[in-house]
Image (cartoon, rainbow, N blue to C red):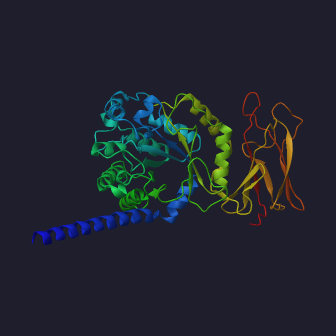
Amino acid sequence: MNKSLSILRVLCMKSALILLLINIVNNKISAQEVKPLNLNKPEIEQWFTDLGFGMFIHWSMDVQLGMVISHSMVGASEDYLNRYINELPKTFNPENFDAKQWVNAAKLAGMKYIIFTTKHHNGYCMFETKTTDFGIMNSPYGKDVTKMIIDACREAGLAVGIYFSPDDFYFLYTQGTPISRTRKEALASGNPELNEYAKKQIKELMTQYGKIDIVFLDGTDQFSKTELAKLCWEIDPDVMVTRGAINTPEQGSPNNPIPPPWEACITLGHQWQYRPTNETYKTAKDVILKLIDIKAKGGNFLLNFGPDALGDFPTEQMKVLNEVSLWKFINQEAFHQTIPNQKKIKDDNMWFLTSKDRKTVYIFINEDQWRFGERKVFNIEGFSATKKSQISVLGHNGKVLEYQKNVNPAPSVKHTSEGIEISVTRSQRIYNDHKWNNPIVVKLTELDINE
């Protein structure tokens, strides 16, 4: 009898082990098989693509030390994690924070939406939540910055966007799970408690601030992003989910056009969050050329900024943004209701956009060291001028060149055997020293585009 019971116990243990292994394999397979789900409405995707240019803001309490946002927690010692979680939040007091200043800076640059990091991977909530005390409401500052940014966006007419990470290192720490971005137990697909926790937080964000226009779901686990996206669409079928549902290349853009919607998210410097030392920022011209290239390929450009510990946009970032704003102020028409030119995206140092009615072409010319008052001629294949064709340079009337009354700065266009020839003068005085090395935009109407 005892021998039979022993055999039965062994068989039961083997069966349980086999079932466990099958379950693990199935979980791995199901996690691997999860593909992005896109329930965005076509008209919402078109609305999003028309926005074109947005501001990304990475900001959390570890900005106080100028470190990489969140990631220093992975592999950190117990002492480090204890001080990071229990001591660092006690000194986070961004007393200079002014949501309207942030939003106005974005609007002046021609940005149409803002995506704000409501919670990054560290789990620190930059919004009011009932799920945890690990957040800005329990900091010395003690105010809901997410609400203030959302309210300022609405007041300025900008679309409201939130970033949310289902990865949560604080939750893993309190759960006793080793902090990781790759281990199964650190991901929502293998951690049901984490999955439910993230869902509670995204539900708060989607319901306590009024309508959220755009949701950016980060993280390494597609299962968690899909689960959260489904909840977002359930709460508001008209919300636009970007990362998690559509293509969102990071720190670059495709070599060739791809069907919209898609969004390239790129840092102004090298780090997502503000780094006070050893940082190198892109020039305004770098940013402008990326904006042109991404728009010409049919995508959205989400440019990232990182406020400092006091809540200010660092001077180095504002200098770049100021020049971008000036260029966009001159050339904003080229980004309104325009689409990629189907026949020609780029030709040497020129990019092309077409109006939606296919009657107007905008040519972005990136010519280095183009002196004020200098005329240049460009030959462009693939377009045909008509008798009704008109040419102008955005921002300039084509009639006056300052202090040079005998110079005619008017642009011209004529038909050639291979396309068109345009003759253009750099005529607008932008800086006092006349040095303005950013692209100019030529507008051509009533062309035979031959797309």
Q: Quadrant of the N terminus?
A: bottom left
Residue at point 45% right, 46% down? 154
Any part of residue 332 in sight: no
Report the residue that reaches farthest toward the left: 1
Any part of residue 36 in sight: yes
Residue at point 33% right, 35% down? 78
- Number of marks in picture: 0
Seen from the viewer's position, the closer of residues 399 and 395 is: 395
Q: Is residue 374 above or below residue 183?
A: above
Locate residue 406 relative to residue 449 in the image: left or right.
right
Seen from the viewer's position, the closer of residues 83 and 37 is: 83
Report the residue that reaches farthest toward the front: 3
Residue 207 percent across, percent down from the top left:
34, 52
Residue at point 89% right, 59% down? 416
Residue 381 percent across, percent down from the top left:
83, 59
Choose top left, top right, bottom left or bottom right for residue 19: bottom left
Residue 252 percent across, percent down from the top left:
61, 49
Q: Quadrant of the C terminus?
A: bottom right
Residue at point 25% right, 69% down? 15
Q: Is residue 441 above or below residue 244?
A: above
Residue 103 percent across, percent down from the top left:
50, 39
Seen from the viewer's position, the closer of residues 33 and 57 is: 33
